[in-house]
Amino acid sequence: MLLAIDTSAGTSVAIVDPSTRAIVIERSTPDTMRHAEVIGTLLAEALSFAGIRPSALDGVVVGMGPGPFTGLRVGIAAARTFALGAGLPLHPMVSADAVARQEALTGASDTVMVVTDARRKEVFWSLYDLSAAEPVRLDGPGLAKPDALPHSDARRVDAAEIPAAQLALAAAGLLAAGLPLASDEALYLRSPDVTMPSGIKRVTQ
Amino acid sequence: MNTDNPLVLGIETSCDETGVGIVRGATLLSNTIASSMDEHARYGGVVPEVAARAHLEAMTPAITSALADAGVTLDEIDAIAVTSGPGLAGALMVGVGAAKALALAIEKPIYAVNHLVGHVGADVLRAPQQESDESSEVDGGRIQYPTIALLVSGGHTSLLLVRDLVSDVELLGETIDDAAGEAFDKVARLLGLPYPGGPEIDRAAVGGNPKAIRFPRGLSLPKDHDAHRYDFSFSGLKTAVARWVEKKQDAGEEVPLADVAASFREAVVDVLITKALAACAEYGVPRLLLGGGVVANARVREVAAVRAEAAGVALRIPPLSLCTDNGAMIAALGAQLIMAGHGPSGLGFGADSTLPVTDIQVG
Ligand SMILES: [Zn+2]
């Protein structure tokens, strides 16, 4: 069984069985303001529903983003310490892979551009080919102004939520095929928002 | 759970230090601190997003290192403690998320605690060899209550009346603008000194005359007595230093750096210690505890020692590694809560950047 955690949009937690591709439980909220509050309860509910102890899991899948909210770090921190605490391997993923897989489940087999909100009038994008058994990411993730998106020929799929179960199943697919997952680094795609201190201002006029 | 002498792992991420500490009851086993201070130096102050990113990267290595230093494994841990607030929201969230998942993974309870009360809790900790040593009176013995606590750092400046560590803490006053540590940083910058300002001002003040310039003591006038008796304000002091320096420069005179640094520092220290001892007197509490990173400033400790003694107040200063933000103090407070019979927090607590000091445990 794989546990999956994603807080790149709302908060989503799931447990899946990679051998049968069955979703045992998925618990999610679209709330983008309460990641730290809900993460513990959603994890506890998922584990309890699945009736599985942490150490009996086989791995922890985590969405590394991209995500615009400070909450992105909550899921990554939680996944890392859960894996450490339960003695499990960590499987980092690009969060948008979950959306591509969900789109493929509808029967789509074309090339799609997964687009999520990056705030500040920008969007995150990732390009996927859905023609194979599992989606293949062709390009991205990237950050762009909405009117400057690349691959304008691809069909656009906008997503507001990242389903953790699909993230786990996408990871299972990559693992089974021996393909690389994402790197274990948060995908901020933006430099920290800092203004360098300007010169020292006079206080006397 | 072992409630007599619980083994607690504490996680602290309220500002720029990722702290993970492990205690057994009141015994300190390890105290791992990863600081992102160097990354903030070029910005002249803590940048919340930079701090939060650094917490995420430092968290699991800090846990692993704290366990190794303590010589314990995760399955021996009885409970997890974590700072819920106050502090920087994005930074706190990393610790809260990490702590909840760790507690669930090892199937142990979690205690969400108050950062400021944690600073007070640091004082209960003893090194392992002191544990059964009756002569530990040499370091002043165990903390007694009630006590006044002055907690001063780059993130907070608070004066507390602690009647009981786990059940009765009152806020007497706090800064209404900059924290004292921030004032050091800002004045260092206007004197052309690097970040962090505390040690730089200390260095510059060597040989300076602390009475050379009479800088203002914020909120210390009779008119402030009613509304802000125990509150602090350092933004006027910073402006006064800037104005004084500009006047010198405009007159084409050299700025006497050592005198300015010493006089500024004296103004900060004077107002901190004066208000703390006034609280001791008014509340009839002859005990003062110092905590927070600004306690690293030698002049703060000197003035506190001299004036506390003159006032007949017993002064307690935990080791510096327990004064700056750290995970051991959070673990210590968690252990005290457990030993006092308090139940764990639920899983629904969040990161509360303005958590009041009366909320010793959250959830
Ligand atoms: Zn502090």
Image: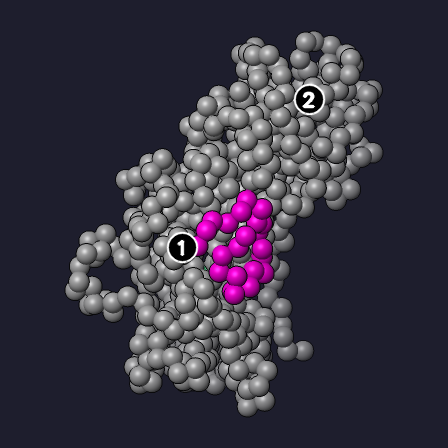
Chain under callout 1:
B
The residue labelled by disc 2 is A139
Q: Amino acid at mark 1?
A: Gly
Callout 1 touching callout 2 (CB < 8 Å): no
Q: Amino acid at mark 2?
A: Asp
Chain under callout 2:
A
The residue labelled by disc 1 is B341
Q: Quadrant of the N terminus of chain B?
A: top left
Q: In the image, which residues are magenta?
A: B341-363
Q: Nearer the viewer, residue B239 or A120?
A: A120
State how the image is colored: one colour
Q: Main secondary structure of the magenta part?
A: loop
Image coords of residue B358 (percent x, y): 52, 65
Confirm whether residue B334 shows in the render: yes
Mark in the foreground, 1 or 2: 1
Image coords of residue B77 (percent x, y): 36, 41
As drawn, the residue found furthest toward the bottom would be B222
Q: CA distance from mark 1 to mark 2?
A: 56 Å
Image coords of residue B244 (percent x, y): 54, 80
- Say if disc 1 is inside 8 Å of ligand 1: no
Circle 1 SS class: loop
